[in-house]
Amino acid sequence: MVVILLGPPGVGKGTQGDKLLEDLQWEKIATGDLLRAARREGTELGKEAQSYMDAGELVPDDVIVAMVEEKLASLPAETGVLFDGFPRTVPQARELARVLPKVDRELDAVILFEAPDQVLQKRISGRRHSPDSGRIYNIYFDPPEEEGICDEAGTALVHRDDDKPETVTRRLRVYREQTEPLVAHYRESETPVLMVDGDQEMDQVQADLRRVLSDTLGVEVSPA
Ligand code: AP5
């Protein structure tokens, strides 16, 4: 099974993907997380990606596709794959379609989350994450027990460099211009595009995501 989580910055792709994988032994391939890990490790890839990410621009397609291809090739064939933040352009989608058959896989569905821009801005301004546990928090909607400290890792939470208001505005524009056309691309290619309303309480979004996966794709997952 291969499923893409698609939607604007801050809509909850990372949060919902993580909650889902608490119950499903799939692998999440989140290109933003892979790039941030490469930056922390100071690799060439991380250095190349930094200026694009800080400006709210997309990292070049060839860099991203090489990273995803390597990750996909490392997974056992029976492991389901959940993409978060990839593909993000029509050329990336075409590359994914070329790469999947090489690892005996095919795309099953795209799940599209939506929420209004002012909701996304507020969520992003409140987002904090733990580089040690990977857990995502929100100071308004999902705070840690102790301010600024991860409940799991016990270490300091950080505010992403690209979560500054002016960069967020740029990221939202880039999403509408370069990523949203993927919806039409997948509809034309007859890949199921399944809608989930991202502008609801987190638990309700998770329940809707699981219902869509189970009812439409037959994925065996318990209701949230
Ligand atoms: P990436 O890390 O992929 O960021 P993004 O797509 O902009 O998505 P976000 O992580 O901002 O949002 P999300 O939908 O995961 O929301 P989250 O769950 O955190 O990419 C970063 C950068 O890397 C890009 O700008 C680009 O430069 C580069 N990049 C990555 N992939 C690339 C690619 N394929 N090609 C080229 N470049 C690429 O939730 C947000 C906040 O809201 C959290 O605080 C959360 O707690 C809260 N929240 C979530 N759901 C709810 C809810 N229902 N109610 C209230 N609060 C909620």
Image: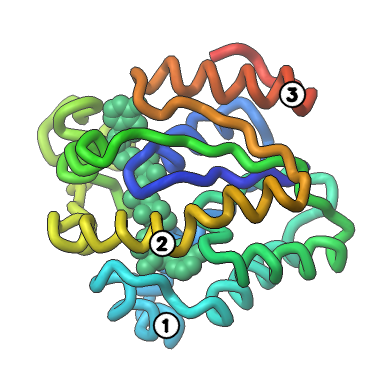
> Residue at 83% of width from left, 45% of height from top?
78
- Mark before the other along the chain sequence, 2 or 3: 2
> Residue at 42% of width from left, 82% of height from top?
43
Q: Is residue 147 above or below residue 3?
A: above
- Mark before the other along the chain sequence, 2 or 1: 1
Closer to the camera, 58 or 206?
Answer: 58
Which amino acid type is shown beneath numbered disc 1? Thr
Which amino acid type is shown beneath numbered disc 2? Glu
> Residue 29 appears at what percent x and percent y?
58, 54
Marks 2 and 1, Cα distance to the nearest angstrom? 29 Å
Name the mark nearer the viewer: 2 or 1.
2
Marks 1 and 3, Cα distance to the nearest angstrom? 40 Å
On residue 216, the disc is 3
> Residue at 53% of width from left, 56% of height from top?
181
Q: Is residue 170 left or right of residue 45?
A: left
> Residue 108 appears at what percent x and percent y?
77, 42
Which amino acid type is shown beneath numbered disc 3? Thr
> Residue at 41% of width from left, 62% of height from top?
177
On residue 6, the disc is none
> Residue 33 appears at what percent x and percent y?
43, 58
The residue indicated by pointer 1 is 43
